[in-house]
């Protein structure tokens, strides 16, 4: 397999075959994201991808495959259909294909087109919401409004594809911490995803967020304030069936809650840790990472 640049994938795709079909991110403007800065976006050629699919035919250890990089769903329907058909033919043991998809790329596809992709093996889409607050989305240049985010989520679910939504603790800064948590809970409720992954902001070098932090325009909330955001998001949201986790390396406290069943126990645990305010209960700063 040939990889170009940095390869990232969600924690839940740790055991998946990583097939790079695009390089970079078609949006590449989020102020907090260092991943593809300076990397021109391109969709790899069919020849490059087919060669990698051929290489992956010896990887029988994994039943899952993840399409990298930042937003593979941006690939036009005809080519994506072709690539999924090739994966199905050459790697018939693959049970689930996953990809990142931002709201704009999802909304470029109709429900019928998404259903076709589902039929060809696309089983899960990871959508970065980051915040349900309109002002924060604008400020971080996420490239979509809350309404677009909700519509994109509903389109994925209508197509029968599993939806995993990422939110970012601390991204509202200290002043908007409460609004960020409450508005995110509202938007998540409307999205009603199967999975939610909370990450915690890390101010990465050479990002606009770092500049904002240096100039004092962005002030990171305290650690326990960010845990309070997590508590509010769980407390004020409502789902039919959702696995809510904060097991990414950027988080101070790993949480894994089946909602709604484990809501009360999880809230009790979070409230206890927040009330204790004891940093030794948390992941040390030097163990955190993106
Ligand atoms: S859409 Fe994702 S990969 Fe692209 S810039 Fe934003 S956070 Fe980074």
Image (cartoon, rainbow, N blue to C red):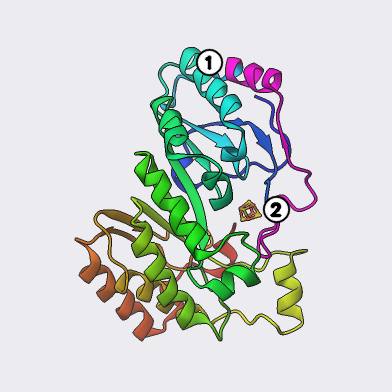
Picture quarter with the N terminus: top right
The residue positioned 51% from the left and 67% from the top of the image is 131
- From the top left corner, tell me how far across and down residue 197 is, in percent: 43, 57
Label 2 beta carbon less than 8 Å to ligand 1:
yes
Residue at 64% across, 72% down = 139
Left or right: residue 158 compared with residue 207: left
**287 relative to 277, above or below:** above
Give the structural element (helix, strand or loop) at label 1. Answer: loop
Residue 111 occupies quadrant: top left
Q: Quadrant of residue 21?
A: top right
Residue 281, image x, y percentages: 41, 73
Q: Which mark is residue 28?
A: 2
| Left or right relative to 259: residue 136 | right
Rendered view: 65 above or below 160: above
Element carrying mark 2: loop
Residue 81 appears left or right of 25 = left
* Viewer can see residue 51: yes
- Total marks shown come to 2
Mark 1: give few (<14), some (14-19) or many (20+) Cα within 10 Å. Answer: few
State the image coordinates of residue 228 (x, y, percent, origin top left): 41, 79
Q: Position of residue 254 (x, y in %)?
A: 40, 62
Q: In the image, which disc is placed on residue 185?
A: none
Residue at 64% across / 41% down in the picture? 7
Badge number at residue 57: 1
How far apart are the two marked residues, 2 and 1, measured between alpha carbons?
31 Å
- Residue closest to the eye, 110 or 29: 110
């Amino acid at each position: 397999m040939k990889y170009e640049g940095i390869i990232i994938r969600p924690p839940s795709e740790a055991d998946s075959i990583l097939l790079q079909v695009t390089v970079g991110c078609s949006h590449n403007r989020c102020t907090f994201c260092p991943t593809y800065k300076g990397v021109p976006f391109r969709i790899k050629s069919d020849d490059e991808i087919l060669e990698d699919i051929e290489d992956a035919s010896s990887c029988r250890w994994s039943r899952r495959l993840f399409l990298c990089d930042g937003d593979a769903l941006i690939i036009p329907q005809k080519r994506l259909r072709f690539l999924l058909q090739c994966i199905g033919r050459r790697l018939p043991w693959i049970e689930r294909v996953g990809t990142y998809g931002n709201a704009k790329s999802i909304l470029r596809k109709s429900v019928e087109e998404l259903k076709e992709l589902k039929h060809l093996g696309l089983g899960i889409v990871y959508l970065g919401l980051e915040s349900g607050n309109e002002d924060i989305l604008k400020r971080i240049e996420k490239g979509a409004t809350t309404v677009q985010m909700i519509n994109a989520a509903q389109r994925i679910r209508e197509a029968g594809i599993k939806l995993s939504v990422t939110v970012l603790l601390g991204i509202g800064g200290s002043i908007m911490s409460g609004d960020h948590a409450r508005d995110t809970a509202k938007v998540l409720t409307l999205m009603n995803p199967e999975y939610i992954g909370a990450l915690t902001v890390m101010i990465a070098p050479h990002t606009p967020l770092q500049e904002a932090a240096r100039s004092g325009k962005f002030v990171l909330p305290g650690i326990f304030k960010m845990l309070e955001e997590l508590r509010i998001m769980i407390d004020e949201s409502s789902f039919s069936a959702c696995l809510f986790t904060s097991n990414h390396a950027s988080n101070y406290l790993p949480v894994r809650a089946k909602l709604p069943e484990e809501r009360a126990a999880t809230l009790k645990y979070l409230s206890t840790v927040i009330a204790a305010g004891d940093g030794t209960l948390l992941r040390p700063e030097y163990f955190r990472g993106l």
